[in-house]
Amino acid sequence: MKRIYFDNAATTCLDKRVLDAMMPYFEKYYGNASSLHTFGTQAKEKLEEFRAKIAKYIGVNSDEIYFTSSGTEANNLALKGIAFANRNKGKHIIVSSIEHDCILNTCKWLEEQGFYISYLPVDNYGLIDVVQLSKLINRQTILVSVMYANNEIGTIEPVNEIGELCKKNNVPFHSDACQSFGKIAINANQSNIDLLTINSHKIYGPKGVGALYVRKGINITPLLHGGGQESGLRSSTENISGIAGFVKAAELCIIEIDKEANRLVRLRNKITGYLQNNFNNSYINGHPENRLPGHLSFSFRGLEGETIRLLFMLDELGIAVSAGSACSSNDKTHNSSHVLQAIGLNPLEARGAIRLSLGRFNTEEEISIFTEALNHTVHQLNPIFS
């Protein structure tokens, strides 16, 4: 049975070209970049080349890039690092209500440490209101964190307007761009973003590698203390082979970013059109147009309680999709999606989204197979609600 993978927002496969680019750093340039001998200095030279490339891809300086083990670590470093470096100025942080769990759970922890968090609501499309944000900013505000694009519904936030507002108020702006980096053009400097989180495994690179951009002059406290790697901000021996893969993956995405985005939009629109033409009870979650190119979240009205069953039925047919965020499967409380509730869905509806995230290796043939399978499986669910 041919298996079809439509869960690229959870993770992507490793591109063979990325694996090839990584191999020399297992076999030849395997030195510790902090060592003073030739093996170490060679690794250090490569590390700085990689840092400069990542910086170029997001429009910043190379000495503003700090490599991490993941997007989660980078987000924790951004929020906790800003909080503890600036608590003498204020203890107020603003985040959107639809952030990834690693942001929201960090905020819960910071609240236990005495910080005050404002959770910015979103509209029915998942967009924050910049005017409302301006009303929340005050003299005690030390950080605003709004994700570049949402991982569950794909909506792209108005980051340029947010950045301009934060700059005007002299408040650092952090954005989690793990879902958007490599898929849409990002220039952190032009968007007035002061801290930006990116990672590797969403762009056909290896897992276990990420980076945090920190604008020069931003005061931030390290989370990890040790040998002083990454200019003292992130101690730990750098994962040179992983970083090599991260950079190669980013390079491949940037080279064809517009062409690939257009291709994914065409594939996504085929599915959207099929849903609209064949299922009167289907509806799209998130913004219909202002969304990531290969991202589609949809539900079937009246069948929301059967989403997990639908997911398993599709999996039996060889098709992998997601019910919301992959990370939500670790939620032992089985809560409804906080993102879907934030855009106005009730708790039952918020359990009922199917997320399709298309990627580099998906084809039109796979779209046809999926729509046929969807038609077959959804109609098997109907008698339950008749």
Image (spheres, grey):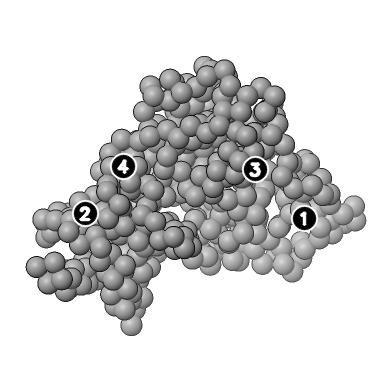
Instruction: Determine whether 282 is above or below 17 in the image.
Output: above
Q: Which residue: 77% across, 63% down?
A: 30
Q: Is residue 105 left or right of residue 179?
A: right
Nearest the viewer among 299 and 4 is 299
Mark 2 residue crowding within 10 angstroms, few (<14) / some (14–19) / many (20+): some
Q: Is residue 109 left or right of residue 356?
A: right
- x, y percentage for residue 377? 20, 72
Residue named by callout 2: 272
Q: Quadrant of residue 372?
A: bottom left
- The residues bearing labels 1 and 4 have C-alpha atoms spaced at a distance of 42 Å
Residue named by callout 4: 343
Mark 3 residue crowding within 10 angstroms, few (<14) / some (14–19) / many (20+): many
SS class, disc 4: loop
The tag earlier along the polypeptide, 1 or 4, is: 1
Instruction: Determine whether 135 is above or below 318 in the image.
Output: above
Mark 1 residue crowding within 10 angstroms, few (<14) / some (14–19) / many (20+): some
Instruction: Determine whether 335 is above or below 376 in the image.
Output: above
Query: What numbered label is drawn on residue 77?
Result: 3
In the image, farthest residue toward the right: 37
- The residues bearing labels 1 and 2 have C-alpha atoms spaced at a distance of 46 Å
The tag earlier along the polypeptide, 4 or 3, is: 3
